[in-house]
Each structure stands twice: as structure tokens, then as C-alpha cells.
């Protein structure tokens, strides 16, 4: 088969298909559940109505989309992989092929930083999210062969301001999960999305100077309601914020001219995660827990 021909370097499309997620208009619902991996996506998709048969598409970059109906309501489940960069691709490329308000809920796994709340196997729901990023410049100052830049190198990690989840969606998510799993299995608090799994979540690695021994304590001091680490929610909530800013600024042209004109409605987002790692006790989830 001939390789696809993409047009428009600003927002590449080939026959209406997006560059990384690979879906086109009509293949994605405006209610989306996003997860990290394809197994979880299939698991969730097993609850979709069997008729009509859900549509599945795996892109060459391994974004995996399943679109079907749940009790008659159209919904897509999209497995995106890990991190901020893929979250950006996922949101923008789905937004480009969906009309109307877009509602996204993420179900991830996470590491809990609270000593009492967020035990292994519990579900945590994000009120809001903070971004934790590694300040790469900081590390120049420690190596004699590198001349440190003249400007101050700052702290090794930067904590952003928090951005809220959609409050209605987050409350709905919490109450539905509590009703199904029992209120003792669900708790709510602040999330930190990190740019890396190891250094920016305060993990110790003897092979590298990560200057992160006080990271969790510093983060919890600055944000006393801090509950869990994962790697995508902040961007999801931040893009919801930016979609609202765009609405305020007024209509724009769509990328492909197919999905009418922008804005087609805001993005709303919320997130829940299962605690896989308890950082205070150093425990980790086991299969079947
Ligand atoms: C790291 O192991 C991954 O697990 C979490 C983090 O956000 C990161 O993507 O979520 P998922 O289980 O959804 O991938
Ligand atoms: N996902 C994360 O990002 N961190 C953890 O500790 C576990 C899952």
C-alpha cells in the first residue's frame, strides 16, 4: 500500500486522518475515556454495547481508538501511551475530528504520596493538577567540565501553579466510583503530573545525580493536599483551560474544513487513577490485588 500523503505542515492531515492518532471525522465520539495502554482500553471497551460492533483503529504510532456505544451513548476509548507530549497529540488530533463539546476522562495508574490516604488499590480522583518539571539547566553547575551559564541555575525541579479539573465532572466521577466500589475505596485530592517517571517523582537512582531527595517533601509542603503522581492529567486540564480561552477569543477556521468552524464547544476534563505505588511505604501493586 502506498504511504499516506500528508498535507499542511502546520497540522498534517492525510485524507482527513490526523498524523499520530490517525483517526478522521466520524471515528471519534465527543465523550472520550483515555488510558495509557491498549489492554486497559480493551478491558473498558468490553462494557460497550455489542451492537453496533465497536470500531477499532490502531495508528502507526500505536494510538489505539475504540469507538462504540454505552447504553446507546456514543463513546470512544483511546489508549495514548505515556507522558505530556502524547497527551498534547491526542487532545489536539481528537479535537480536530470531533464536533461540539468534547468531554475527556482519564483512567490511569498512579503513585500516592500521602501517608494515610491513597492506599494501594484505591482510586484517587483529581481536584486539580500541578506540573512538576525537571530544570535541566540546574545540573550544569555540578559538572566541572561544563561551564555553568551566567544566569542563576535555580532549583532542580519546578512546581507549576495548579489547574482545576472540571468540578462537575470530577464530582460525578467521584460519586459514581464511590457508588460502585464503596466510598472507602475512593478519595479525592491534588495531583502532580511529572515530566519523567523517575527523577521528577523523587525516585532514587544510584547511577545519576537527580538532586531529588527532598522533592516529595517540598511538593507536599507547598501543596498540603497533594495526593498522587502520574504523568498526563495536568496537560489535559490545562488544555481544557486553553480551549475556554479560545472560546473567549472567538471562532477560528477548522483544520480540515470538514468539522465546521471553531470553536465547536469547550473541552472539559477530569481524571481518576488507581494507586499502584505507595511512595511512603514503598509498596507496589501486585496482580489480583
Ligand atoms: C507510568 O508508569 C505511566 O503510568 C501512569 C502514568 O501517568 C504514566 O503514563 O498512567 P497510565 O497507567 O495510564 O499509563
Ligand atoms: N504511575 C506513575 O506515574 N507513578 C507511579 O508511581 C505509578 C504509576
Image (cartoon, grey):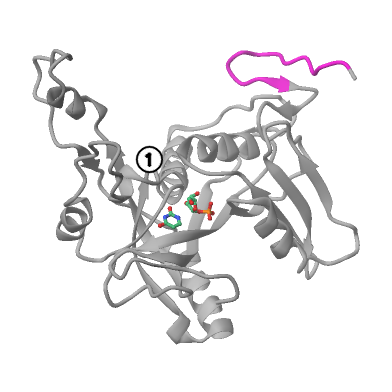
Residue 80 location (% of width, % of height): 61, 44
Residue 278 location (% of width, % of height): 36, 67
Q: What residue is at 63 percent from the left and 27 percent from the top?
A: 254
Mark 1 Cα-neighbour bin, 10 Å: few <14, some 14–19, many ≥20 = many
- The residue wearing badge 1 is 195
Within 8 Å: ligand 2 and the Cβ of disc 1? Answer: no
Q: Nearer the viewer, residue 113 or 90?
A: 113
Q: Is residue 86 visible to the viewer in this orientation of the structure? A: yes
In what element is the residue under mark 1?
Answer: loop
Q: What residue is at 17 percent from the left and 58 percent from the top?
A: 217
Quarter-wise, where is residue 191 in the image? Answer: bottom left
Residue 136 location (% of width, % of height): 26, 28
Q: Nearer the viewer, residue 253 or 185?
A: 185
Residue 241 location (% of width, % of height): 41, 45
Q: What residue is at 80 percent from the left and 18 percent from the top?
A: 4
Determine if the magenta segment contains residue 89: no
Is residue 46 rendered to the left or right of residue 170? right
Which stretch did the figure color magenta? 2-13
Q: Is residue 263 visible to the viewer in this orientation of the structure? A: no
Determine if the magenta segment contains residue 8: yes
Q: What residue is at 64 percent from the left and 34 percent from the top?
A: 96
Q: Nearer the viewer, residue 287 or 276?
A: 287
Q: Is residue 103 above or below residue 114?
A: above
Quarter-wise, where is residue 227 in the image? Answer: bottom left
Q: Is residue 150 above or below residue 125?
A: above
Is residue 229 rendered to the left or right of residue 31? left
Q: Is residue 240 above or below residue 33?
A: above
Amino acid at each position: 500500500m502506498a504511504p499516506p500523503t500528508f498535507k499542511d505542515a502546520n497540522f498534517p492531515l492525510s485524507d482527513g486522518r490526523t498524523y499520530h492518532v490517525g483517526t478522521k471525522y466520524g471515528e471519534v465520539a465527543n465523550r472520550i475515556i483515555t488510558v495509557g495502554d491498549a489492554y486497559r482500553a480493551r478491558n473498558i471497551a468490553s462494557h460497550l454495547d455489542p451492537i453496533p460492533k465497536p470500531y477499532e483503529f490502531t495508528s502507526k504510532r500505536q494510538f489505539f481508538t475504540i469507538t462504540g456505544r454505552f447504553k446507546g451513548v456514543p463513546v470512544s476509548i483511546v489508549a495514548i501511551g505515556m507522558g505530556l507530549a502524547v497527551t498534547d497529540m491526542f487532545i489536539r488530533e481528537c479535537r480536530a475530528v470531533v464536533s461540539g463539546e468534547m468531554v475527556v476522562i482519564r483512567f490511569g495508574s498512579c503513585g500516592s504520596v500521602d501517608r494515610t490516604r491513597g492506599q494501594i488499590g484505591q482510586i484517587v480522583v483529581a481536584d486539580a493538577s500541578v506540573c512538576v518539571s525537571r530544570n535541566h539547566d540546574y545540573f550544569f553547575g555540578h559538572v566541572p567540565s561544563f561551564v555553568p551559564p551566567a544566569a542563576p541555575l535555580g532549583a532542580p525541579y519546578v512546581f507549576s501553579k495548579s489547574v482545576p479539573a472540571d468540578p462537575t465532572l470530577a464530582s460525578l466521577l467521584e460519586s459514581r466510583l464511590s457508588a460502585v466500589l464503596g466510598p472507602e475505596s475512593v478519595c479525592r485530592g491534588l495531583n502532580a503530573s511529572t515530566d519523567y517517571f523517575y527523577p521528577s517523582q523523587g525516585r532514587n537512582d544510584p547511577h545519576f545525580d537527580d538532586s531529588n531527595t527532598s522533592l516529595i517533601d517540598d511538593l507536599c509542603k507547598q501543596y498540603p493536599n497533594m495526593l498522587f503522581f502520574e504523568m498526563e492529567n495536568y496537560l489535559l486540564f490545562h488544555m481544557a483551560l486553553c480551549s475556554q480561552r479560545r472560546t473567549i477569543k472567538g471562532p477560528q477556521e477548522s483544520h480540515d474544513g470538514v468539522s465546521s468552524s471553531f470553536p465547536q464547544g469547550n473541552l472539559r476534563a477530569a481524571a481518576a487513577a488507581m494507586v499502584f505505588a505507595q511512595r511512603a511505604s514503598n509498596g507496589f501493586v501486585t496482580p489480583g490485588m
